[in-house]
Image (spheres, rainbow, N blue to C red):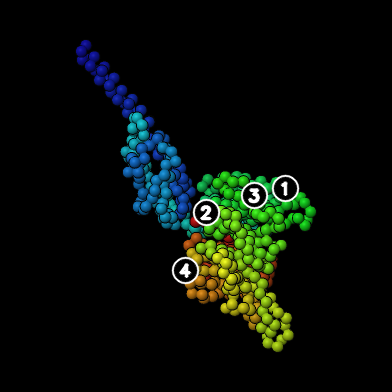
Amino acid sequence: MFRKHWANILGSLFLLGLAAGALAWWRAPRVALESPQNGLLPRQDILITFTAPMQAQSVAERLILRPERPVSLRWKDERTLFVHSTSPWPAGERLTIGIGQGARAAGWPSLPTLENTIWEVQVSTPSLLYLWPEDGAPAQLYRLHLGDGSTEQLTGEPFGLTGFTATADGLEVYYATVEGDIYHLARRTGETSLLVDCGEDVCANPQVSPDGTYLAWERTPVSGPPQEAAPHVWYLRLDGGSPAPLPPEDGSSRQPVWSSANRLCVYRPEQAQFAVWNPADGKIVSWDNQTGEEGTWLADSTAFIAPEITLLPNGYLAPNSGFLDLPSSHLIRYALDGAPPQDLSTEDPAVEDTSPSASPDGRYLAFARKSLRPDSWTPGRQVWLLDFSTGAYRPLTVSPLYNHTAFAWSPAGDRLAYLRSNRNDFSQPTEIWLADLAGEKAPVRLLIGGYAPQWIP
């Protein structure tokens, strides 16, 4: 009887131990990688979640990251951890990240994680966003992966898109539909949402500030008299503001371009001026310009560069020919500090220079050039580069029958994408090409029929 009694006690204790162990295993905190799911962007945080509130120090001590690099840990709450790299994750690198065994839950009972939880994460390489097709079916937004040449469709708007813009980190995309509204595409999740309902008006040409603080676009009324159907630039602070017209509201404005310092440049045709608005203090700086063609900010936001009409004097190209003054297009540098405008096309005044685009590292200016000299005139404009560090100009393409426009710099400033179109045969589709400035490789064609290229990390 005595032995049977102790056997029952020992059996009960054993079962109790099994139950306690099972409960501990069931209640032990578990770890999950919420993002990224399809590749880590260079400036994206890694999001790790836990099934229980955790002790922050215990988790930090068991963070696994290979190769090692400086990171900071930010807790949204006791279950949600963001791992932030103090510098961009190296493009193309494969990371090992995880939480080791023994990271303890907060409160009682302070149960530990029971095993090492590890994931392999691939850092994305820079890629191109673009619109396709050029004609026919509604244009949608696509992404081209330069590594393997594959493409993926990012939007499926029934009537298509008219334009788009992306933040410098590539995480947020904003686009305008043919119906005239503005949508937001979150690249982390792939979800789209209506951002600005423009009603009966047509909104187009969205432009986001590089840091993602502001969005500007053109808004054109279509219900009033035809003479009033002129665009006016509106803007929105994306952290909770309301859409508002750019001051002053009288007169039209178009072509919004943000600088890296969050200053917005627009063109005002009635005044024949570029105007720069600072949303921080409301101040406006203006520069006279008759052309009104699109321009570019320098990387440090100290100046804006845009084409302007310049007259070559009578007989400049052919002495004693009796020609009238010949109009040309030169690139003009407009400085924010009030310095006089500077002509950047004086190296050869007999040119038409347009479509300037400054590289993000501040070294180069890409632009389209056509010679006006009879012996070197061509139907198409070629890609030229101005090296700010040396002051030297050089052509990047020599394809006389083709126009080259829509210049888009890679985030590192070492590659230039552009649009090429046949000026001798307008039935031919446009093409997106890529030039590698770091090497001696010839430019290569990436796509046929796409347009409006823009880089994302």
Q: Nearer the viewer, mark 3 or mark 4?
A: 3
Q: Which residue is mark 4?
A: 438
Image coords of residue 60 (percent x, y): 35, 43
**Circle 1: residue type:** Glu
Q: Which of the two residues, 234 or 188, is positioned nearer the viewer here?
A: 234
Q: In the rendered structure, find residue 261 and report the number of the disc placed on it.
A: none
Specify few, some or many for label 3: CA neighbours under 10 Å numbering under 14, 14-19, or 20 or more. Answer: few
Sequence order check: which comes first, mark 4 or mark 2? Answer: 2
Q: Is residue 115 visible?
A: no
Q: Which residue is mark 1?
A: 200
Q: Nearer the viewer, mark 2 or mark 1?
A: 2
Q: Are marks 3 and 1 in contact (CB under 8 Å)?
A: no
Specify few, some or many for label 4: CA neighbours under 10 Å numbering under 14, 14-19, or 20 or more. Answer: few
**Circle 3: residue type:** Ala
Q: Nearer the viewer, mark 4 or mark 1?
A: 1
Residue lying at the far top of the rendered structure: 1
Report the residue at 41% width, 53% height from top: 86
